[in-house]
Amino acid sequence: MTAWRTPANRALLERMLTALEQRQPDAPANQLVAAESMTFNWPNLKACLADSLGCDDETRCQTMMRQLAATDTPFMLFSYQFGTLRNQMLKLALDDGAIADAQRIMTLFEEMEESFAAIYLEIFLNRLGTRNHLRLSHIRALNDKNLLSYFESHLEWMATLIEATRQRDPQGMPELDPNHCKFGKWLSDEGVRLIRDHSYIAQIRELHEAMHHIIAEIDELIVQPRASGPVYAILKKAETYSLELGNEISLLNSIVIMSVYSKDTLTGFLSRRFLDRVLANQMEIAKATESAFSVIMFDIDHFKDLNDRYGHQTGDLALEHLAGIVRDTLRQSDLIFRYGGEEFLLVCPSTKLPQARLLAEKLRLRIEACPVPHDPPLPLSASFGVSEVAPGTYEVVDTRLVHEVIAACDGKLYAAKRGGRNRVV
């Protein structure tokens, strides 16, 4: 029998709950947590504890904990409320001069919180394992992994971490040293040559090292008797690191695509024949990293008139000029395709709609401000359509879905043209 379930300790807690209910039926205003939309609040917390003590039935508390864990409600919210209840009991005991009772209450609440945290951790581990498996399945579905193979290996690393934590097995933990994993080795070698910004390399290395250091943190805890709450918090942090690292690797992967895929000879942009494959991969990556991306389609306004008046050689000069502006404006990780004669498509990883619209507007302004070098200089303008692709809006990636994404962005582009051109829609 655990200490808080012994007759003497149950009697103490029941007595304190009764006294608390008589003196202070509701939580003090400054102790309330805005959690009414969730499955717990101050009255529910007291009621579940009373059930556990009075009739030896922990069902209500366990149900509450399972509901909280199932909705990914941070355990700290429950812990705060539970700590408030403990503090109120302590205050009653100290007001009565019962120092020994106060000490027992502290010990009993620590034990109770650990039992609740263990339930929470068990359910969180199951949910985390499922989420990690789904992310891994999306990466494994990629046609061309390139650098994403490193994210795949780290998702496998996470799976090992989850299982070792579930078993409370320090010997089963994954690799601790970030320099011994495949990505760590790549980052110190090829990565340095690929990434122009050395501060960006340092940022990625710091994230990668922090993720591996999780092992050291958990190793110290899982052998301790009351560590479920802290272990849960560390695993939450590990999941965040995993998604951030996957996002960074996906951005680096885009740089690789731009450097190794064959290009259109005139503009140096990616050829359209790779678009479906790249876009499908990006949709799988978005599901794995839980990060939306955006697609921007644009074309040069009245390009046919320019060709007809000045000839195709001047038209080609205009396309080369525009390509230079685009390269100088985009991030290194943005993917740019020559979609048609004077029509282009941008895939912007980890970019939500507001950011993508700002990027399109920046590009529009630069094109408008930089005429084609010619005698006389030839002004250019472009129209833009912008769409966001959110991973929560689709389940299975197929050719039909890829074409729908392109069609939606194309529709925005034509809306910009109908609206008077030289604008972003």
Image: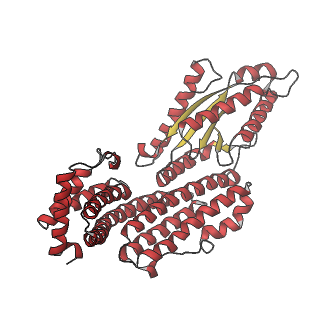
Mark yes or no: residue 341 visible.
Answer: no
Q: Which residue is nearer to you in this view: 288 or 355?
A: 355
Q: Residue at x 23, y 48 (%)?
A: 26
- From this view, report whether residue 379 is shown above or below residue 238: above
Which of the image's four quarters has the N terminus? bottom left
Which of the image's four quarters has the C terminus? top right
Q: Residue at x 40, y 59 (%)?
A: 131
Q: Quadrant of residue 119?
A: bottom left
Residue 198 x/y as whole percent: 73, 57
Residue 237 x/y as whole percent: 48, 61
Residue 288 x/y as whole percent: 48, 55
Q: Which residue is nearer to you in this view: 116 or 176?
A: 116
- In this picture the colour scheme is secondary structure
In the rendered view, does 107 fall on the left or right side of 338?
left
Residue 351 x/y as whole percent: 56, 43
In the rendered view, does 351 fall on the left or right side of 88?
right
Q: Quadrant of residue 129?
A: bottom left
